[in-house]
Image (cartoon, rainbow, N blue to C red):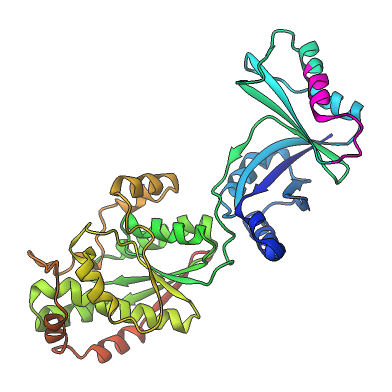
Amino acid sequence: MEKAILIRFGEIFLKGKNKYVFENLLSHNILQALKEYKLRLTKISGRYIVTEYEDFYETEIMEKISHVFGVHSISPCFVVKTLKQNIEDCIKGIKIDTDTFKVDVKRADKFFPIQSTEFAAMMGGVILDSQPNLKVNLRNPETTVFIEIREDGNTYIYSSIIKAVGGMPVGSSGGGLLLLSGGIDSPVAGYLMSKRGMPIQAIHFHSFPYTSELAKDKVITLAKIISEYTGNIKIHIVPFTKIQEAIHKNCRPEFMITLMRRIMMRISERIAKQNNLKAIITGECLAQVASQTIESMTVTNAVIEDLPVLRPLIAMDKEDIIEISKKINTYETSILPYEDCCTVFLPEHPVIKPRMDKVLKEEIRLNVEELIAEAMANIEVVETNEE
C-alpha cells in the first residue's frame, strides 16, 4: 500500500484528437509547480498520479497542485495492486469520522472478476465489521469511500475530493499583456485569462516621484501572488511621469484620463508585439469609473492597430470581483494605500462620454511619438521568479 495524490482534469477531455497536447502541457505545468519537491508524476487513463513524495509535504503539494490551471480536483489516496485481499486490507484501515457512509466502486478494469455494485456491498461490510457504530446511507452519506479499479493494475482508494481551480493549462492559448495597475481589478483579470490557458506578461505605468517606490513594489507583489497560478510573469515597468506632465501642461484637465489611457494602449500594443503576445488584457468593468464607459473605451480602443483588447471583468459586479480577489489572495495587497499613476493630476470632473473629435483636438497638442519613444527607452523589466 502506497500513499498518492490523484489528479483529475476537466475540459481537456473535450479536445478530441488534440487531447494529448493539452495533457502534456498540463503535466509540464504540474511538474513546474512541484519542482522543489522530490516525487514522481505518472499518467493513467483520465488521471495523473503523484507518488514517491515525503508524507510531510503532502498538504503543501496538494495546495500547489490545486492552483494549476487545468486541474479539476484532487484526492489524497492509497494505491494497492488490484487484488481483492489487498483492497480489503486497505479498506479495513480507513477511519470514518462521520455517522453515515457508502462505498462507491468504479471498475474500469473489466478483468477484475467482481461487479461494481457487488464489490461495493462487500467492502461496505468490511467497514461495518471494523467500525460497527457506522450506518450505511446510499442516498445522502456524510462520507463516501471511493474505490477506483483502474486499467494500470492498481486500485486507488480515497474518501475526499478537493476542488481545484479548473480551466485550461497555461500555454494552451496565445499570450497576453496585462495592464496591472495595483488595484483590485487587474490582478483578477490576469488570473481569469490565465485560467483560459493564456500565459501573461504585465505592464505597469509608474509615475515617480508622484507615486512612491512602494506603489511599484505593490504591483510586483501582486504579480508574484498571481504567478502562483499563472507561472512566471515578466513585468514591464514604464516611466510615465513625463507623459502625465505633458498632458497636464498642454491639454484640458477633463481629458487627462482619456489621453493617458490612449497613450497607455499605444505603448501596451508595442510592447505586446515586441514580446510576441497576441492580446492586451485590462481590468475594466463597464460603468465602474469615468474611463470605463462605452464612449471612453471606444476612444481608447481606437489607437489599437492590430491586437484584441480582452476585458474579462466587463460585466461583473464589484462584489464578485472582490470575492475572486480574496480567493486568490490579492485583495489585501490591492487595498494597500499606495496610489498608482491614475491618481496623479486627477481632474475634478473627467469627461465620461468623450467625443473623438474633441479628444483628437487635445491630443494634437502633444508630441505623442516622442513621449512614447522616451518612455519605452527607459522601461524596467522585472520577473516574478527572480530571487
Residue 207 appears in the rendering: no
Judge by depth and name the residue closer to the eye, 367 or 135.
Answer: 135
Please say if 101 is above or below 55.
above
Q: Is residue 40 left or right of residue 27?
A: right
Task: Determine the image quadrant of residue 180.
Answer: bottom left
Give percent across and percent down for residue 343.
19, 64
Residue 65 appears in the rendering: yes
Give percent across and percent down for residue 140.
60, 21
Q: Is residue 61 left or right of residue 349?
A: right
Please say if 7 is above or below 146.
below
Task: Identify the residue at the far top of this view.
Answer: 133
Judge by depth and name the residue closer to the eye, 247 or 159.
Answer: 159
Give percent across and percent down for residue 141.
62, 20
Give percent across and percent down for residue 148.
78, 36
Queried whether the magenta region covers residue 23, the answer comes back as no
Residues in magenta?
109-124
Q: Residue at x 43, y 61 (%)?
A: 190
Queried whether the magenta region covers residue 123, the answer comes back as yes
